[in-house]
Amino acid sequence: MSTASVGIEYKDWISTVTIDNHPDNHLSKEVLSQLNKIVSEILASQAELRVVVLAAKGRNFSAGMDYAGFVKMSKDEAGHFADVGYHLLRNIENLPVPVIAAVKGETTGAGLGLALAADIRIAASDAVFSFPEAQFGVPPIFGSSQRLYKTVGVGRAKELLFTGRTVYAEEALRIGLINEIVPADQLEEEANRLAIRIGSNSLSSLRSIKMLVNFGLNEGYETGLKEEVTAFSEAFNPDTHQWERR
């Protein structure tokens, strides 16, 4: 019987979602199902939510798919699995509040793809990253081929996907794959500190910032610029007074 689980803890306007699928936190069908349920319900149960932290138990954030366990999937099963993961990461990406991924150890394949759906990635010094799919004869999954180049640039993304090579924390920081490196034994503390710092700001501003940046990425630069004008004007709408709201 599987013991995979995903837990959630809510404190001080921060929700911490924790994967626990010993030993490598593979993104199994069960884990994806639980993550989907939590992400779809997270705002309904926490109206004042300001930050979400994605974390994991054990030594690794997530080694992605367990390829050995998926080799017997049919075409339809593989398509369904990819579609479930696609919608999960889109839902994470579309959460109206900032999402922080606290990554450590192996953060690879679909596990790295999951981290890329977050807005900010803070990494333990022992974190290692890769997209090994080319070594297994499959393409990237869950939108990784698209999010990676938006994060590190087209040339670097292609090189990492073509080679499947390992990237260590220092290089990951240098190329923009992660935002910060912290000692491994301080990852949880530092991720929570960052979440509190972000969450101390105006909820309406946090939501506007995330909406505007994502809108520009998805709809284009000029459209994003125009949307910012509208959003700033709306902040002074007498029916909302967003600038007064904390």
Image: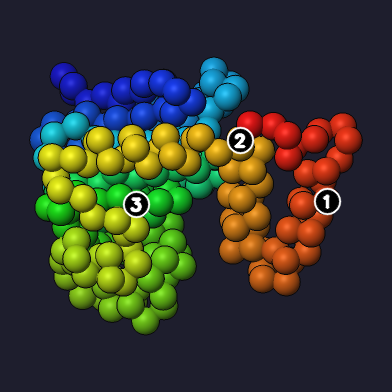
Q: Which of marks 2 and 3 is nearer the N terminus?
A: 3
Q: Say left or right for 139 vs 72.
A: right
Against 5, is 82 above or below?
below
Circle nearer the viewer, 1 or 3:
1
Q: Earlier in the sequence, mark 1 or mark 3?
A: 3
Against 50, is 111 above or below?
below
The disc labelled 3 sits on which kind of residue?
Arg
Q: Do the residues labelled 1 and 3 touch (CB within 8 Å)?
A: no
Q: Residue furthest front?
A: 244
Picture quarter with the C terminus: top right
The disc labelled 2 sits on which kind of residue?
Leu
- Crowding near the residue tagged with mark 3, few <14, some 14–19, many ≥20 C-alpha atoms within 10 Å: many
- Which residue occupies the foreground of this view, 40 or 203? 203
Where in the figure is residue 54, as x and y percent of width and height? 35, 38
Residue 233, labelled with which disc? 1
Instruction: State the separation of the CA atoms marked 2 and 3.
Output: 21 Å
Quickly name the residue at label 3. 121
Q: Say left or right for 197 vs 220.
A: left
- Which residue lies at the image location 43% right of the left edge and 57% below the top edge? 143
Q: Residue furthest right?
A: 238
The quarter holding residue 159 reads bottom left
- Crowding near the residue tagged with mark 1, few <14, some 14–19, many ≥20 C-alpha atoms within 10 Å: few
Residue 107 appears in the rendering: no
- Which residue occupies the foreground of this view, 188 or 133? 188
Quickly name the residue at label 2. 203
Picture quarter with the N terminus: top left
Q: Which of marks 1 and 2 is nearer the N terminus?
A: 2
The disc labelled 1 sits on which kind of residue?
Ser
Residue 233 appears in the rendering: yes
Instruction: State the separation of the CA atoms marked 1 and 2.
Output: 17 Å
